[in-house]
Amino acid sequence: MSKKQTKKSKPSQETQDEAMKIARGTQRPGQTKEQTKLIAQGIQKGIEQYKKQYKEKSRQLDRQRKKMQKQSEVEPEALVEEKLVYKQSVLPWGLLVASWIGFVAYLTMG
């Protein structure tokens, strides 16, 4: 009996750099490097989660597109062409940054 092993993939350097850049941008005076590192890790996890959700959504759209192609092959007179447009929203990033700013403010005030 073999158990399913989950691979913990190391985040890409690009993700780490982006998270650190955001964390430094929200850094408060007197904040330690450790606190900034923790904030960067939280932002990094948020970015990874967002990417996973984006990939899953992309896979679902791809499945729908393939399904539509198969249907159009069966029924050539019902020719419907779909164009997939992938648009990244600024809202999730804005909410993530705002929540971390609030978190840092709470830590520095309390």
Image: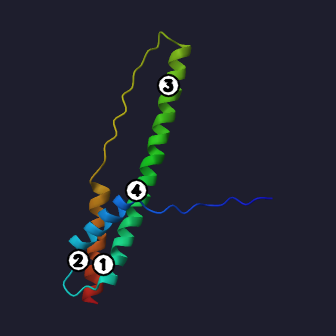
What x and y, as percent, mark residue 47?
38, 60
Query: Which residue lies at the image location 39% right of the left edge and 63% below the top edge?
Result: 46
Quarter in which the C terminus is drawn: bottom left
Question: Which quarter shows the N terminus?
Answer: bottom right
In the rendered image, residue 102, in percent from the top left (x then y), is placed at 27, 75
First in residue order: circle 2 vs circle 3: 2
Q: Nearer the viewer, mark 4 or mark 3?
A: 4
Q: Please, what secondary structure does the residue beneath circle 4 have?
A: helix
The crowding category of the residue bearing disc 1, from other C-alpha atoms within 10 Å (few below 14, some 14 to 19, many at least 20), is many
Q: Nearer the viewer, residue 30 or 9?
A: 9
Residue at the spot of label 2 = 27
Report the front residue among 62 and 92: 62
Q: Residues within 10 Å of mark 2 (few under 14, many from 20)?
A: some
Residue at image mark 3: 68
State how far apart marks 2 and 3 are (Cα).
Answer: 49 Å
Q: Position of residue 101 (x, y in %)?
A: 26, 74
Seen from the viewer's position, the closer of residues 21 and 47 is: 21
Q: Amino acid at mark 3?
A: Met
Q: Quadrant of residue 40?
A: bottom left
Q: Contact (CB < 8 A) between labels 2 and 1?
A: yes
In this figure, which residue is indicated by the disc labeled 1? 36
User: Disc 4 marks which residue?
Assistant: 50
Instruction: Determine the CA span between mark 4 and mark 1.
Output: 21 Å
Query: Which residue extends farthest front?
Result: 13
Three-letter code, disc 1: Thr
Q: Residue furthest left?
A: 29
Q: Find the distance from the CA under tag 2 to the CA under tag 1.
A: 7 Å
Asked if one can make out residue 98 in the rendered structure from this viewpoint, the answer is no
- Of the residues tagged 4 and 1, which is closer to the observer? 1
